[in-house]
Image (cartoon, coloured by chain):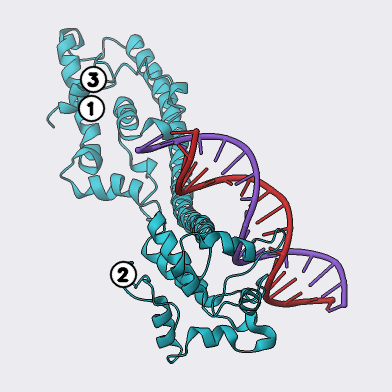
Chain colours: A cyan, B purple, C red
Amino acid sequence: MAGSGRVYNSSGGASSSLSVLLQNQRGSEPLDSLFLSGSSNASSTSPFLGSTSMVSFEDVRRGNGLKRSMFHQYEHEENCDDDLDDYFHQPGKKRRLTADQVQFLEKSFDLENKLEPERKILLAKDLGLQPRQVAIWFQNRRARWKTKQLEKDYDVLQANYTSLKADCDSLSKVNDKLKAEVLELSDRLRLRDKERANSEQSDTNKLSQEPQQMPNSESVSEGEVSKLSVVACKEDLGSVKSDIFDSDSPHYTDGVHSSLLEPGDSSYVFEPDQSDLSQDEEDNLSKSLLPPYIFPKLEDVDYSDPPANSCNFGFPVEDQAFWSWSY
DNA sequence: TTGTGTTTTATTGCCTCC
DNA sequence: GGAGGCAATAAAACACAA
């Protein structure tokens, strides 16, 4: 029986014979008989020669009087490649590998997709192929593997992109909603500014017209005015503090921050009518709570010159010490 | 049967490594 | 400089619908 040489086993070594392996797979059928079965179309039934091999194994045997299998032929001489070249190298013709050959090559490829020279020779001998054919098969197989790998990577990337895009769209909607809210609040602030300015103007006019009616008005120092303003301001801020700025208050998280985080919530929108914030407090609230990227138009509002009775008393609006007051 | 698209085998040219 | 790998490509083999 031919094919008594070494062969790769499943662990990649050269410890078992491919012919023995195939005999086991085919019920101990001798390989020679497989090559010879069907004399009219021997090549089509050969386990290791393609159905359209340019030279059938029977042709090989008839032409050279060989009584040995391809494996045996390989075992006998080192320069057998030259003879095989004579048989197989016919320009313009290609032979397809048999299913068995491909299966064996696939298994070998699964073990190691690179082909070291020794393994190439052994595989070539065991499969009855030229070493170059084995090398070419591995090369093409690596190319196919790479293509598939790229397709897999592409699928993964596309899935990630789809997921990220959904997140982005969702965040974009939230952002748009917040922007609209900021614009609305800005408009309200502007309106309140005007109303207060008008009110102050009328108060000033009243005072200038009836100075004698103010009891002890001359004795009120600037400091006392400031104190009065602070009291008024504290009263103004009282509700604001408890509703918004007291971080211990549940309203802080439930009413403001959580609403920013949960735009779908019914409490999401600010209630402008219940706001008792003074101008500066609202300014600072706007500037400190709202990130710049959703508050692009604040520069359009003139906050640099707050009303005289505002509670910052000349402190810069940005002065965070303003918020450190104890109420 | 034939035209056409796909798969497989093989070649070529370039590049890298030893 | 030779060997081997890879990308691009050619071409044979194959599958399949019309």
Residue holding disc 1: A233
Task: First in sequence, mark 1 or 3: give its number.
Answer: 1
Choose between A297 and A104: the one closer to the eye.
Answer: A104
Q: Position of residue A299 (x, y in %)?
A: 44, 22
Q: A97 above or below A34? A: above
Asked whether residue A133 appears in the rendered view, the answer is no
Residue at numbered disc 2: A11
Label 3 secondary element: loop
Q: Is residue A293 above or below residue A308?
A: below
Instruction: Give the Cα distance between marks 1 and 3.
Output: 17 Å
Q: Is residue A205 left or right of residue A35?
A: left
Quadrant showing the C terminus of chain A: top left
Q: Quadrant of the N terminus of chain A?
A: bottom left
Residue at the disc numbered 3 = A319
Residues at marks 1 and 2 on the same chain: yes
Alpha carbon of mark 2 to alpha carbon of mark 3: how far? 75 Å
> Label 3 is placed on what type of residue?
Asp
Disc nearer the start of the sequence (1/2): 2
- Quick check: A172 left or right of A112? right
x then y, percent, for residue A86 = 63, 62
Q: Amino acid at mark 1?
A: Cys
Dot 2, crowdedness within 10 Å: few (<14), some or many (≥20)? Answer: few
Contact flag, marks 1 and 2 (Cβ < 8 Å)? no
Question: Which residue corresponds to the image point at 39% horizontal and 51% vertical from the top-left?
Answer: A263
Place residue A252 in its image quadrant: top left
Q: Nearer the viewer, mark 1 or mark 2?
A: 2
Q: Nearer the viewer, mark 1 or mark 3?
A: 3
As drawn, is A237 to the left or to the right of A56?
A: left
Q: Quadrant of residue A42?
A: bottom right
